[in-house]
Amino acid sequence: MLALLRRRPAFRRLFAAHAVSRAGDAFNTVALVVLVLRLTGSGAGVAATVAFEIVPFLLLGPVAGLVVDRWPRRDVMVVADLGRAGLAALLALSHGSVGLAYAVAFGLSTGSLLFNPAASALVPDTVEEDELVEANAGLWSVAVMAQIVLAPTAGAVIAAFGVGPAFAVNAASYVVSAALLWRLRVPAPASRPSLEDIPPGIEGACPPEPPVGPPRGWPGVWAGLSAVRADPLLTRLAVVQALAALSAGATSGLLVVLAADWLDVGPSGFGALLAAIGVGAAAGPLLLRRRIRPGHPAWLFGPFALRGGVDLLLAAVSSPLVAGGALLLYGVGTSTGMVAYQSTLQTAVPAGVRGRAFAFYDVMWNGARLASLGVGGLLAAAIGIRAVYLAGGLLLLAAAAVGLQSTVRRPNSSALCSSNSS
């Protein structure tokens, strides 16, 4: 990873901005939950915060993807950072209203909705294609490690000084990120041929890409969806992601209930379970990055089978020690699957529609995740928390089964596009 950072100055700047921003997010995540819990005194109030973070993806996701593809992605990221800095600073100065907290949660999520697809779409412009897995592994690992290391620090800061300084740290992180990105210089991506230029029926063929700027309105949004629909593997990935989100929304959101009702551990035990997931998520890409193959079904969909098995084990075994070890593997599966997913989209989707493709998957994931939270809560109340993890495990195994039916993507699909365009 250090060699990649030395070789690629543009990626080094993008990586630094990402790391600083994620560090601030760790403070914000803890401070926002603590603030809302203090103001409302209820778990329902905290759950509403999650809803306000998800809703922007459902309302604005397609439009955000079009913005990412129409405007220079670096500029989109800088504007998103500065907007989020202002919102975080607002909560640092005034944090006595739950309405303001919800509004800021909505606004910060909207900024992330612009920032994240732009960053994901920009990575292939800063490294070579054969460096994508290492780049994505580094970005993922630094985000997870920031959460593991800085979340407890944020808790200590809040306990000593209140939530204001924690929100101030988050605001400052966005300003630093914007300053780093402002000097980011990347070459303009090369255009690719239209779908008509590629022989039909070839998996990995390039979807249509607008030559300069995408069309306005819904035709522009549809171009991003067409990029996914034109590729059998990406279409299958969309189905698999929806099934996985229907599982993960409930199981991740209700882990605290599993810890209390089934594993019989208190807050410290719950924290240890979260730490186990984090350690696995940080270690996975670092240990396996040289083996991950973008577009290969085993790496794209195999992790869902691993996570499904973990959920079934959690539903069956009440030992906190076994649960911790299983969640360590769950973290490995989550992180390696995410690196494979990011690298696959960056390789398979043309640069001109890449932002819309990432936004499409974000919308789909968060919509299914929101439905999962609602259904999972009802299922836990009616039958018990073990039923949630049993259903979640079966959904993940189904997702893996659907995905593993696909064929292996031909390597270096972008080279195919280049040869067809010559």
Image (cartoon, grey):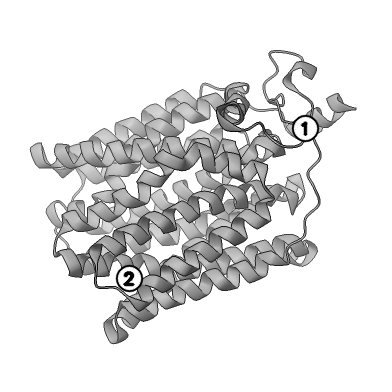
Name the residue carrying label 2: 31
Q: Is residue 31 left or right of residue 196?
A: left
User: Can you give x and y, in whole percent of width and height, for residue 318 in the image?
Assistant: 18, 51
Q: Given this view, does label 2 or label 1 mark the residue nearer the observer?
A: 1
Kind of residue indicated by mark 1: Pro
User: Can you give x and y, in whole percent of width and height, for residue 218 in the image?
Assistant: 55, 28
* Position of 334 relative to 320 (above/below): above
- Label 2 – label 1 distance at C-alpha: 44 Å
* Position of 267 relative to 113 (above/below): below
* Position of 139 relative to 195 (above/below): below
Which structural element holds mark 2? helix
User: Can you give x and y, in whole percent of width and height, for residue 297 in the image?
Assistant: 56, 31
- What residue sits 31% from the left and 66% below the top? 32
Name the residue carrying label 1: 211
User: Can you give x and y, in whole percent of width and height, for residue 91 in the image?
Assistant: 36, 71
Label 2 crowding class (10 Å Cα cut-off): few <14, some 14-19, many 20+?
Answer: many
Q: Quadrant of the N terminus?
A: bottom right
Residue that extends furthest to the bottom in the rendered view of this protein: 160
Is residue 131 among the parts visible in the rendering?
yes
Looking at the picture, tell me which residue is in the foreground, 54 or 130: 54
Which structural element holds mark 1? loop
Looking at the picture, tell me which residue is in the foreground, 205 or 409: 205
* Position of 35 relative to 193 (above/below): below
**Sooner in the amino-acid sequence: mark 2 or mark 1:** 2
